[in-house]
Amino acid sequence: MSLPPVIAADLGGTFLRTGVVTSDRVVVHAAVRPVGDRRGNAAIGAFLAGALRDAFLAARSRSLEPSAVGLAIPGLVDPAAGVLRYSGNLDVRDLPVAAIVREAVPLPVVLDNDVRAAAWGEWKWGAGQGTRAMLYLSAGTGIAAALIWSGHPYYGAGGAAGELGHALVVPGGDLCRCGRRGCLETVAGGWGIARRAEKPTAETVFEAAAAGDPRARAVLEDARRFLGMAAVTAVRLWNPDCVVLGGGLLHARSPLIAAVHDAIGRSALSGEEPPPVRPAVFEARSGLVGAACLALDPP
């Protein structure tokens, strides 16, 4: 039996994706908005509320009656309280996301960290179906991982499990958006790659490296090395039976993909096989689909 559709939103450091998603896995309405220079509680709260109000009205215009809202939010999220505790990339602290959304859209709200939500969607509907321990590794504006273990997301003691982007990899290195120095994101996250190469985006760095630019090539080589190391660390810690790659920097044409595959392939100890590495089925929409799965079938 089909369930009523839900409104889903995936907020990242670069884009906000919204959609109306059915239990039959159909996105009947979708929109993408650039986050731009919006930072801070007031700006992000208003941005989310406006986009979700538009999605709700779009659903009603199609004679659809959504039953809930699912949100995928970057940073440290308290799902039970409905609060985004901290997001360095958005400069947000203690934002009552669920309450803000309920004021704009009169529906129940379910939210979680964006990477955990994407992992949940890939485990329910995508590349991780049928696995017992699925590791989802995401690299985009930021970097994070999520584990789905025996049908449940792993949160850790305080909900911060998987924040690989803020693991120290370069002691005394570049200043991170979190306020510390030398985090993985400073050398392998989208914003860090762009800043180190003095280019507008990570994609322009990739293009410059392919064209032979020596600075871009050096920055890319660092990103490949450190991201591969992080992937191996996550595999060794969690021993998954499958690794799913997602996020804006790990698409099929990315020069970072081979580095992660190779590093994981070499990570096996004597007598064991490395876990298979698969691309996220929903690619750029993994977070959106995951947000819909949160609302349709909460963990």
Image (cartoon, rainbow, N blue to C red):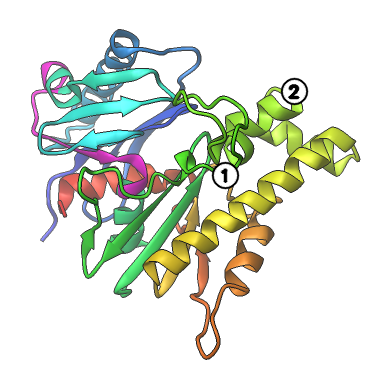
Please indicate whether residue 209 sits to the left or right of residue 23 in the image.
right
Eyeballing the image, is 136 above or below 242? Answer: above
* Element type where label 1 sits in the image: loop
Eyeballing the image, is 48 above or below 42? Answer: below
Question: Is residue 231 something one can see in this rendering?
Answer: yes
* Residue drawn 71% across the image and 45% down it: 222
Q: Which residue is mark 2?
A: 198
What's under tag 2, amino acid-wise?
Glu
* Residue drawn 57% across the image and 44% down it: 169
Point out the frontmost of discs 1 and 2: 1
The image shows residue 99 at horizontal and vertical percentages of: 12, 21
* Element type where label 2 sits in the image: loop
* Residue drawn 59% across the image and 38% down it: 171
In the rendered image, the residue lying farthest to the bottom is 271
Measured in 3D between alpha carbons, the distance from the residue under mark 1 to the one under mark 2, in whole angstroms, is: 21 Å
Q: Which mark is residue 282?
A: none
What's under tag 1, amino acid-wise?
Val
In which quadrant of the rendered view does residue 65 lie?
top left
Eyeballing the image, is 26 above or below 56? Answer: below
Eyeballing the image, is 234 above or below 51? Answer: below
Magenta stretch: residue 115 in it?
yes
Q: Quadrant of the C terminus?
A: bottom left
Q: Which residue is mark 1?
A: 169
Report the span colored magenta.
102-116
In the rendered image, the residue lying farthest to the front is 172
The image shows residue 181 at horizontal and vertical percentages of: 54, 29
In which quadrant of the rendered view does residue 240 lie?
bottom left
* Residue drawn 52% across the image and 68% down it: 277
In the rendered image, the residue lying farthest to the top is 42
Crowd band around label 2 with a 10 angstrom C-alpha radius: few (<14), some (14–19), many (20+): some
The image shows residue 217 at horizontal and vertical percentages of: 82, 41
